[in-house]
Amino acid sequence: MAAHPPTTIADLQSRLLNHSYVADRGLAVSLFLALRLQRPLFLEGEAGVGKTALAAAVAGVLDTDLIRLQCYEGLEVSHALYEWDYARQLLELRILEASTTFDADRARLALYSERFLLRRPLLQAIDPARTRPAVLLIDEIDRADQEFEGFLLELLAEFQVTVPELGTVRASVPPLVILTSNRTREVHDALKRRCLYQWIDYPTFEKELSIVSRRAPDASRALATQVTAVVQELRASDLYKKPGVSETADWLAALVALETRELDTAVLDQTLGVVLKAKEDLDALRERGTADLLDRAMARAAIPR
């Protein structure tokens, strides 16, 4: 049985929290309106701040399917919408041709039927057979080409598409659409205007501590506090690639796996590759000294050393 939609913004925040997602009031309002108004939600922010994780949490809240379309340069509509299973069609054609009652017109109808249709994420999301809306995540739309953006404009307007061989496919229940962008390029205003917009920034110290503590429940409060303080300090530094919340959680989980009770310079130096993903950043930090970083982080969080 599907979960009922959240009735209030506070209810939505509480239910997201049950799925280990900490949403502030502004984000919760945008998401609540997207659900109520059946409008796409466009999320922008740095990599690792929780844009993709929000879609998974919402799917959990609604007890529905999460359908993800990962965008990339050169993404073609056919890979996002549907393709025909040519290998199976060819095999079927050979079987039909071997029949004594072969009829070309009937064979064509048989070959271009639902049996041989490969539904990609966009077509899965608007499947008329759905009785409850899916959550459609269009991830990193900024990596796709502008031509693909133009196609999305049409799809998001009507939630329908024409398959020439089968006819028009129209959603009986439109999906909740969440688009994300890391701003590697500007997304066209026409697409943004069809959506509700929300910028997700790096979290405050308190919010990040709450997030990673939920994601790594076996970690002590002291270790979680130290790790969060160091990552917050790293983001204040001049880095090529600043760590996101996902890196903070990964680092904390790694330290728990190493049975680390508290951070020191040796552990910090040995595990920096979990939280920093650029050689330039690792080299620069080690050149400046990890002891200084740890001191500044502990001061930031008011942790005695």
Image (tube, grey):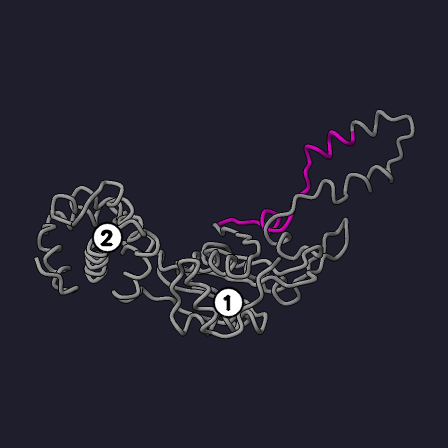
Q: Which residue is found at the position 38% from the left and 66% from the top?
A: 200
**Residue 255, magenta (yes or no):** no
Q: Nearer the viewer, residue 129 or 236?
A: 129
Q: Find disc 2 in the rendering and name its residue.
A: 220
Q: Which segment is the magenta one?
A: 73-93
Q: Residues within 10 Å of mark 1 (few under 14, many from 20)?
A: many
- Image quarter in which the C terminus is found: bottom left
Q: Which residue is found at the position 18% from the left and 47% from the top?
A: 261
The answer to whether residue 179 is left or right of residue 273 is right
**Residue 181 has which mark?**
none
Q: Amino acid at mark 2?
A: Ser
Q: Which residue is found at the position 44% from the left and 58% from the top?
A: 19
Q: Which residue is found at the position 91% from the left and 30% from the top?
A: 101
Q: Position of residue 196 (x, y in %)?
A: 50, 72
Q: Is residue 190 visible?
A: no
Give the vertical position of 78 relative to 94 (above or below).
Answer: below
Q: Nearer the viewer, residue 177 or 101?
A: 177
Based on the displayed image, in which of its 4 quarters is residue 298 positioned?
bottom left
Q: Find disc 1 in the rendering and name its residue.
A: 41
Q: Amino acid at mark 1?
A: Leu
Q: Nearer the viewer, mark 1 or mark 2?
A: 2
Q: Position of residue 181 (x, y in %)?
A: 43, 60
| Element type where label 1 sits in the image | strand
Q: Position of residue 251 (x, y in %)?
A: 27, 48
